[in-house]
Image (cartoon, grey):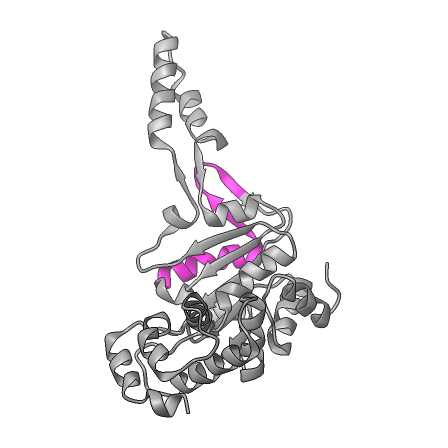
Amino acid sequence: MVTSPEELATTLESTGYLADEGVATAAFLALSMQRPLFCEGEPGTGKTSLAIALSQSLKLPLIRLQCHEGIDAAQALYEWDFPRQLLHLRALEAGSERLDVEAAEQSLYTERFLLARPLLKALTTAPCVLLVDEIDRADDEFEAFLLQLLDENAVTIPEFGEVRAEQPPLVILTSNRTREVHDALKRRCLYHWLEHPDLSREVAILRRRIPGVGERLATQVAVAVRRLRELELLKPPGVAESLDWAQALLALNRDELDVETAAKTLGAVLKYTEDMERVRAKLDALLA
């Protein structure tokens, strides 16, 4: 295990994730204190990528739960394999003239028929990184459901009993702040707000993640993307879009970003036609 935020930053860099001091410190404390880390920020600031990089750099399995509206315990924790249970019950009936009903019922609710979903997998796969992605998309009931897991690293399955992690997973929760997450959940976590990287770090990310990109092109893309973020766009570009844009330019054998090429490749960095129309009218100023 790492012994300092600086060592963790170096470890993360080996995967291509360039963490600033704040991110490295927050992730190190989550590791050291065995506390969940709640990462909040605009889309594209590297929240999900942090969990992936931690998994890769620490050589731990990554278990991901993608939240969405209406997600419930059956999708996140476990389900019983009803078709196999039914076949098992029929086999018992066929093989015995006098079926012990109580024993048959007990045999239906064993690990053999338990379908583990991401949260249960995280408790039984120790150690690991558990990514609960976009928790702000889930509803209040699901947040409340998470509290026992975050408090005790355990869950209770009524028909089966308690499942407790031998070693707590490293839990990373992310939110794009489409709604406020309740204080009860935040209190159980360390908190960090992720900003878009500064210019020099974004250039470094581009050059690290895309080996073929030159200093001039990486700087032009990073500067242009920073200026796009200052506009009132429906979806400001994140680092992922910066990477896509640089890769698109390389695919067209460009070693610099000019107005004509930028106009042709805006689809790599902007995702709404309204944003593209607005930016096309300002390309000369953006690339000046």
- How far from the left and from the top, in percent, is residue 195? 50, 79
- Whether residue 103 is visible to the viewer of this picture, yes or no, is yes
Which residues are the magenta region?
139-162
In front of the other: 238 or 78: 238
Q: Seen from this angle, which residue lies furthest front?
A: 253
Check if residue 34 falls in the magenta segment: no
Residue shown at the point (43%, 74%) measured from the top left: 238
Q: Name the residue located 31 percent from the left edge and 89 percent from the top edge.
A: 282
Front-most of residues 11 and 204:
204
The quadrant in which the N terminus is found is: bottom right
Question: Looking at the image, is 108 positioned above or below residue 270?
Answer: above
In the rendered structure, the answer to whether residue 281 lies left or right of residue 251 reads left
Q: Residue at x 36, y 79 (%)?
A: 262
* Quarter of the picture holding the C terminus: bottom left
Residue 16 percent location from the top left of the image: 59, 65
- Where is residue 131 drawn, in percent x and y? 50, 58
Residue 249 left/right relative to 188? left
Looking at the image, how many numbered discs can be counted on the residues?
Answer: 0
**Residue 251 on image: x %, y %:** 43, 65
Magenta region includes residue 145: yes
Considering only vertical position in the picture, is 134 above or below 266?
above
Q: Could one spot residue 270 in this view of the protein?
A: no
